[in-house]
Image: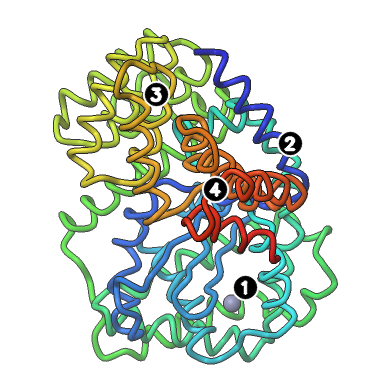
Amino acid sequence: MKHILIILFALFIGFNGDAATLINDTEIESGIAKIVVPIAKVANIPEDRLKIYIVRDDNFNAFVRGGEDIYVYTGLLKQIKSPNALRAVLAHELGHTIGGHMVQIAERMQNEMIRTMIIQALGIGLMVAGGNPSAGAGVMAGAAGIGQQSMLSFTRDEERMADDMAVDLMVKAKQDPNGLIEVFDQMRDLHGAFEDRINPNRINHPLTSERLNNAKTKIRNLKTVPKKSSDEVAHENQDYEILRAKLIGYLDSDKTVLAHYPYKDKSDSAIYARAIANMRAGNLDTAKTGTQTLLKRYPKSPYFYELLGDIEYQYGHYDDSIDAYEQSLKLSNNAPQIETALALVLSERNKPGDSERAGELCRRVILNEPSPLAYWILARVSSGATSDWAMAEFYKMNNDDKNAKKYAKSAQKKAKKDSPEYIKSGDILKK
Ligand SMILES: [Zn+2]
């Protein structure tokens, strides 16, 4: 089993370059969607149009593009004090969109960043791209400058308007607008630490304390301030802590994980983060024990089954890994990310029927939510024109035009004219 990880490692590592990385994770994306849906609704963005993207970057940042594509940085997700504060940040970003503030230069930089983005899944996908966090270091450094810039390219007036809009959206959605105050308090602490190294553009940027006062005044003048019951808040916070634990477990060093989640902490989130970190470190028995504790507490969680599947895969127990992913798939309503993990292990086990099932799963993923890994697995479990075309798509998604065209040419030679593989390979050759 180490074999496939090494091949994949080499393939994916070659692409990293200075591109930014998008993290593809159903559990985290749907968790954030739940937080943002209420404000998106009152901003007239239908739930099914809303798309959450997670940018692997340690900056405290988020932006909205085209009105319904929301990009949130892992730095913000890991550090933000509460889900309601996160909601306020996203309300502020939607405020820029509604106000039409998208400064051209920011849009251009964002487009450039998105064009070169690499998609990476957590779980098996992250192991593939190099389980150790330093593998992503270059990536993060490359993206950092861009992230900082886009946050700074709004004017003082635009920031104030977006803050006002954030309060309005929160109130309209029956959410506590004090989430915004929480964010400013936190930003003030963050900025304080970096005051010397601030970009000169920041001269245009309204000071956090000024924004804090504006927002406070605005909230004070409201007729009523929506407040949720303490039970509701506790529940929402607990759900969010699971997402935060997953990000920290996968993206941070063992030391950081244990600093956040020491062994005496027996909460769900602490056990989750430590199980993930232990799996990454190869302490599979400890990882499995933790995961089984979580499954005892939550026998219907698709994501704890997913983790169990990841761990069994690392052991080389393909049958157990496949059983766990099958459970996960059922409970998650066929999440593409879990279909991909299952396909990968099937392609590795390679018993009679495994290739066919893996191929089917990959085709479903490609239809719903294409990812480089799904194309790579499809290429692995098929042959001839299909395999070459899938490799061409894999390289195209990784912005490697040379190899994409090479494989597209080869696929066209093997494919029947007017077959789907022939036509799709033709599309790649045209660009
Ligand atoms: Zn702003």
Q: Amino acid at mark 4?
A: Ala
Q: Amino acid at mark 2?
A: Gly
Q: Earlier in the sequence, mark 2 or mark 3?
A: 2
Q: Residue 208 got which mark?
A: 1
Q: Earlier in the sequence, mark 4 or mark 3?
A: 3
Q: Position of residue 22 (x, y in %)?
A: 56, 51
Q: CA distance from mark 3 to mark 1?
A: 49 Å
Q: Earlier in the sequence, mark 1 or mark 4?
A: 1
Q: Residue 104 got which mark?
A: none
Residue under the image location 63 percent in, 27 percent down: 9
Mark 3, residues whose alpha carbon is within 10 Å: few (<14), some, or many (≥20)? Answer: many
Q: Where 6 falls versus 301 (above or below)?
A: above
Q: CA distance from mark 4 to mark 3?
A: 28 Å
Q: Where 214 falls versus 320 (above or below)?
A: below
Q: Which residue is mark 2?
A: 14
Could you tell me if the residues under marks 2 and 3 are in contact, i.e. CB atoms within 8 Å? no
Q: Nearer the viewer, mark 2 or mark 4?
A: 4
* Quarter of image, res 171: bottom left
Q: Residue 345 got which mark?
A: 3
User: Is 106 or 13 nearer to us in this picture?
Assistant: 13
Q: Amino acid at mark 1?
A: Thr
Residue 391 visible from this viewpoint: yes
Q: Amino acid at mark 3?
A: Val
Q: Nearer the viewer, mark 1 or mark 4?
A: 4
Q: Position of residue 408 (x, y in %)?
A: 65, 50
Q: Which residue is mark 4?
A: 415
Q: Earlier in the sequence, mark 3 or mark 1?
A: 1
Ligand 1 quarter of the rendering: bottom right
Q: Nearer the viewer, mark 2 or mark 1?
A: 2
Give the number of marks: 4
Could you tell me if the residues under marks 3 and 1 are in contact, i.e. CB atoms within 8 Å? no
